[in-house]
Image (cartoon, coloured by chain):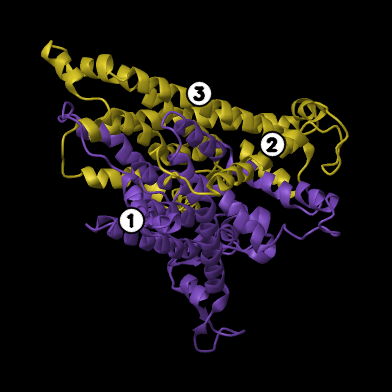
């Protein structure tokens, strides 16, 4: 859900110019107090000393970041070597989110293209069909995916009944299950921006390519894809970013082996680890990663020659 | 185009992938819905149609827990959606009808902040904030967090709708000596209604569905439907959970359908 980018479309009149500060004030106050300030406070917390079983002691410390990056041996007195445990968790999260994004693109692009080439009056209905599952509780969707993939679940039953396999496939608690779960969670985010881009695409370009003896697939690769590239990139970001910090899919589908960033952070606050500064530091690193991606994206969007060649 | 030997727009296999896409999206939900009507206490075998588990949700041993959680969820969602929709409507009026001003881009960035920060980071930050000011965690903390988080979701459809309404209607009202307040309440607000309703429903669903933020800022013993369901699922998926899920699923689909038709009728009535 989070990790989105929104479009600002500019103004339409200035009737309420004089009272505009008063109209904006409630939004400013709410968002500064309840979102911006807390994020800054989280940055501060990541530099404090942990208190046993949750909370912090107000004493400056690099301990959280050291724990993240530094391995000082069993007794903590050796020189700093790179600590791989947490970097690996981040790396695995990036990898999982990336695979889920590719999966979403492979299914989402043809779907979006297909919908955008339907007659104009039925398109909203198709879009509606794609968006409905997004409005269904993410938890319920993840639980139903868990129900499908489990050992005695409908997929294994169907495969065994048809005689394709003799023993149930281990699908739950695997990397594959996490990718499917992430794909299932955020697929509409891939379809919608690509759909919007293909809908704006001028199909006379495809006809011109075809007249010049380009094959269908050459046309897709050389003409359509470059033209709708902004939509494809937006879709990839909208799937990748929330997948990176996802908690439910890795927790309910991946099991203990397939730990991702979201679970690492959650464990520091709700679980047994109880190390708030470390949780805050991990959150800061995740936030930095996301902001870097979004900034690169904004830069790319701002370039004059975005998309079509 | 019809005279061409083949249609340059269509690609073989794209229809099949679209069908596959919809299958993946819908089949798991349908399977859970079907199994919620299973007479068996086991989730593995099918023993015939029964409303047993729906009865269990309302009068069974865990019914009190679910009723309290459902009440919490709906009370929080109604208040959070109302407040955030109000805030978003005022903000949209300033952003769309306030001319150009220096802090406009900054304001837009602030409004979309909850969309850019990963949800789990917002959850951590909010928990830390409430903890550091000594605000005891409970329903109120969930409500405050939801109000802030729902603002962009309410704002986007409202701003999009206002964008589509030219300000000539208000200008005309002003020329006829209507005050600004009258121009707002008598002209802009009624024209805005489809956008406001969509924004409200969107915020409502977002609040009702939220698990991560709620899980972080809720006090011990305070549950909403998603946290109660999550807690139960950790013990294993039981049929009564599937019945609750199916009811929530049906509720969400009804809400989205209403929202769809409201915005569609709004399109048709657009002046």
Residue B104 pos. (x, y %): 22, 42
Is residue A160 shown left or right of residue B83? right
Residue B183 pos. (x, y %): 21, 17
| Chain letter of the yellow region | B
Q: Secondary structure at mark 3?
A: helix
- Distance from disc 1 to disc 3, alpha carbons, whole Å, reads 48 Å
Whether residue B223 is visible to the viewer of this picture, yes or no, is no
In front here: A20 or A295? A295
Q: Are marks 2 and 3 in contact (CB under 8 Å)?
A: no
Residue A303 pos. (x, y %): 24, 59
Q: Nearer the viewer, mark 2 or mark 3?
A: 2
Mark drawn on residue B258: 3
**Residue B142 against residue A286 in the figure, above or below:** above
Residue under label 1: A212
| Chain letter of the purple region | A
Chain letter of disc 3 in the image: B
Is residue B94 shown left or right of residue B44? left
């Amino acid at each position: 859900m989070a990790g989105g980018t929104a479009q600002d479309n500019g103004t339409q009149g200035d009737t309420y110019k004089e009272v505009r500060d008063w109209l904006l004030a409630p939004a400013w106050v709410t968002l500064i107090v309840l979102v911006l300030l807390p994020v800054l406070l989280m940055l501060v917390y990541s530099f404090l000393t942990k208190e046993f079983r949750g909370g912090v002691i107000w004493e400056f410390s690099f301990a959280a970041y050291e724990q993240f990056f530094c391995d000082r041996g069993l007794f903590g007195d050796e020189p700093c070597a790179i600590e791989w445990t947490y970097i690996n968790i981040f790396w695995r999260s990036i990898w999982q989110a990336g695979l889920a994004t590719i999966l979403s693109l492979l299914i989402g692009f043809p779907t979006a293209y297909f919908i955008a080439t339907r007659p104009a009056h039925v398109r909203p209905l198709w879009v509606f069909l794609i968006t409905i599952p997004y409005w269904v509780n993410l938890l319920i969707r993840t639980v139903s995916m868990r129900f499908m993939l489990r050992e005695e679940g409908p997929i294994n039953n169907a495969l065994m009944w048809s005689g394709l396999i003799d023993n149930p496939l281990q699908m739950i608690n695997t990397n594959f299950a996490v990718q499917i779960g992430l794909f299932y969670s955020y697929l509409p985010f891939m379809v919608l921006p690509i759909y919007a881009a293909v809908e704006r695409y001028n199909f006379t370009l495809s006809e011109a390519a075809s007249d010049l003896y380009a094959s269908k697939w050459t046309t897709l690769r050389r003409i359509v894809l470059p033209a709708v590239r902004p939509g494809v990139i937006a879709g990839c970001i909208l799937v990748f970013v929330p997948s990176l910090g996802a908690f439910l899919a890795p927790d309910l589908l991946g099991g203990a082996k397939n730990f991702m960033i979201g679970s690492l952070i959650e464990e520091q606050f709700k679980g047994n680890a109880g190390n708030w500064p470390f949780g805050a530091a991990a959150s800061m690193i995740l936030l930095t990663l996301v902001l870097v991606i979004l900034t690169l994206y904004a830069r790319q969007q701002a370039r004059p020659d975005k998309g079509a060649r | 185009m019809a005279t061409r030997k083949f249609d340059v727009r269509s690609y073989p296999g794209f229809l099949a992938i679209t069908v596959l896409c919809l299958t993946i999206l819908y089949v798991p939900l349908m399977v859970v819905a079907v199994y919620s009507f299973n007479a068996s206490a086991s989730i593995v075998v099918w023993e015939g149609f029964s409303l047993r588990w729906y009865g269990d949700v309302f009068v069974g041993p865990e019914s009190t827990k679910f009723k309290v959680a459902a009440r919490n969820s709906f009370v929080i969602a109604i208040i959070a959606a109302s407040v955030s929709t109000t805030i978003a409507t005022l903000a949209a009026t300033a952003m769309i009808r306030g001319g150009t001003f220096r802090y406009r881009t900054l304001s837009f960035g602030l409004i979309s902040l909850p969309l850019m920060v990963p949800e789990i980071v917002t959850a951590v930050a909010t928990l830390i904030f409430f903890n550091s000011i000594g605000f005891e965690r409970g329903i109120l903390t969930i409500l405050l967090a939801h109000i802030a988080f729902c603002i962009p979701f309410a704002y986007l459809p409202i701003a999009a709708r206002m964008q589509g309404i030219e300000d000539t209607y208000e200008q005309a009202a002003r020329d006829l000596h209507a005050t600004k307040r009258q121009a707002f309440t008598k002209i802009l607000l009624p024209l805005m209604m489809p956008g406001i309703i969509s924004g409200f429903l969107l915020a409502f669903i977002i609040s009702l569905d939220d698990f991560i933020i709620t899980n972080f800022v809720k006090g011990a013993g305070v549950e909403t439907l998603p946290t109660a369901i999550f807690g139960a699922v950790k013990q294993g998926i039981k049929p009564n959970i599937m019945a609750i899920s199916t009811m929530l699923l049906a509720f969400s689909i009804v809400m989205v359908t209403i929202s769809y038709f409201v915005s569609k009728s709004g399109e048709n009535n657009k002046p």
